[in-house]
Amino acid sequence: MRKEFLSPEIISGVIKLIDFIAIMLIGAAAHMIYLAGYLENPNYSSYEFIGRYLITSAFGAFLFLIIYQRMGGYNFDRLARLSWQLPRLALAWFGCFSILLILAFVAKVSETYSRGWTISWIIGVAVFLMISRIIIDLAIARWTYQGHFFRNIVVVGAGEVGKRFIEKIQHNKDSGARIIGVFDDRKSRLAPLEPGINVLGNTDNLVEFARKNPVDEIIVALPLSDGEGLRTLFEKLKSLPVDLRLSIEPLAEMFSVNGIGEIVDIPLLQIADRPLKQLNGIIKKCEDVILTSLLLAMFAPAMALIALIIKISSPGPVFFVQDRFGFNNKAIRVLKFRTMYWDKVDPSGAQRTMRNDPRVTRFGRFMRSFSLDELPQLINVLRGEMSLVGPRPHAIAMKAGDRLYHEAVDIYFHRHKVKPGITGWAQVNGLRGEIDSLDKARQRVTYDLEYIERWSIWLDLRSC
């Protein structure tokens, strides 16, 4: 599986930043060369460099990025195609500079710019863009050969549509896709697939497979005539933290399809994307590690004092450890300060905690009122099992009303597409405490899914 720091999204973003900085620096370097001949001029002011040439270079760099982004030049698939890049780079840079000349002419400031600087900047940027794309092409080719960009693909469908899809992927080694499994619900005998590709089970088996293996993308390659069957299938698979796509190759054979993703030349409808992937995932991880380390250092004395009071005030261990749902439905061992009498705790979580619960100690009530019992979960965050902000981790046997939570709310498992959090969007919106009705359970899941869809650093800050 590819490394996160070599993901296509990261590489595209870094190249944008390099282009912007380089175009600015080349403009500055061209001006320094121009400046060397004017150092003896008493009327020359160094402010001219800051106020005119550098700002012009920055505006030109920003304009180039807009134009080239609109042309699709930073799409990863196109960055890896030198024959596509070079002519379009020339076109984008020519267009950018033409706009700058028109603006300078309209503003009647064109005569204030040095022709030597102008020519040096044009040529310098053009040479840089050409050399940088050659280097990028070689680097991407090397990283691709080393397997950094391979996506682990699971195919749903072993009939004719799926068979054609698998054949195209297997016969195109530059697709960047690696098929790690095929699943199909149909019980009739299926045609043999490509060598080394086997049907591993039905879609129920697929859900279990995706919980245990690194799957990047699920491609549904089934006949499009069964609309209700496809809808049911997508509802089942949307709980998985993967990209979910529908192959529409049969439609593409009948008429042209535009504006849709593809692998090789197979058009795919984008049904769902896994949240917090690539750059967002790295930002979220850095946020968790940095802030959690600071919080642990800050609260360490208080945590030590709490542990001492728990030990003195009632018999039993300091910590209460419970199995709860984590990322992708995997069970994690969540830490809490013990708030109940040890002989009355319920490790399964089946028995709800109620207001004025007699099982809770006096000091436990104090801790719960200020959420101090959750502080040990900072350790879970550092272990990579939780985040500071996210859907709260629920006990596996937790109930909503008189039914298991995940049975009572049909989209419950969708909330496990991200790591659980010490606090969450639902809690910020007042949904705390006992879940004694199905309506409250659904409200919490709704807020959890809203958080996943709208995630941003700002939303995390609002949820703290």
Image (cartoon, rainbow, N blue to C red):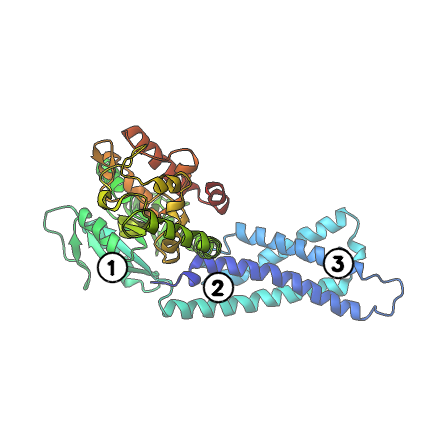
- Give the residue pinned by disc 1: 180
Q: Could you tell whether 128 is left or right of 343 in the image?
A: right
Above-or-below relation of 28 to 372: below
User: Is residue 428 depicted above or below 136 in this figure?
Assistant: above
Point out residue 367 in the picture as x, y percentages from the top left corner.
39, 42
Marker disc for residue 50 = 3
Q: Is residue 77 at all visible to an observer of this figure?
A: no
Q: Quadrant of the N terminus?
A: bottom left
379 or 274, which lies in front? Answer: 379
User: What amino acid does circle 2 point to?
Assistant: Ser
Q: In which image quadrant can residue 166 be found? A: bottom left
**Residue drawn at 24 percent across, 56 percent down:** 212
Residue 239 percent coordinates (x, y): 29, 44
- Type of the residue with mark 3: Ile
Instruction: Check residue 83 in the rendering and tell me which mark sits there, or answer none.
Output: 2
Q: Nearer the viewer, residue 73 or 98?
A: 73
Marks 2 and 3: in contact by CB < 8 Å? Answer: no
Picture coordinates of residue 182, whole percent (x, y): 21, 54
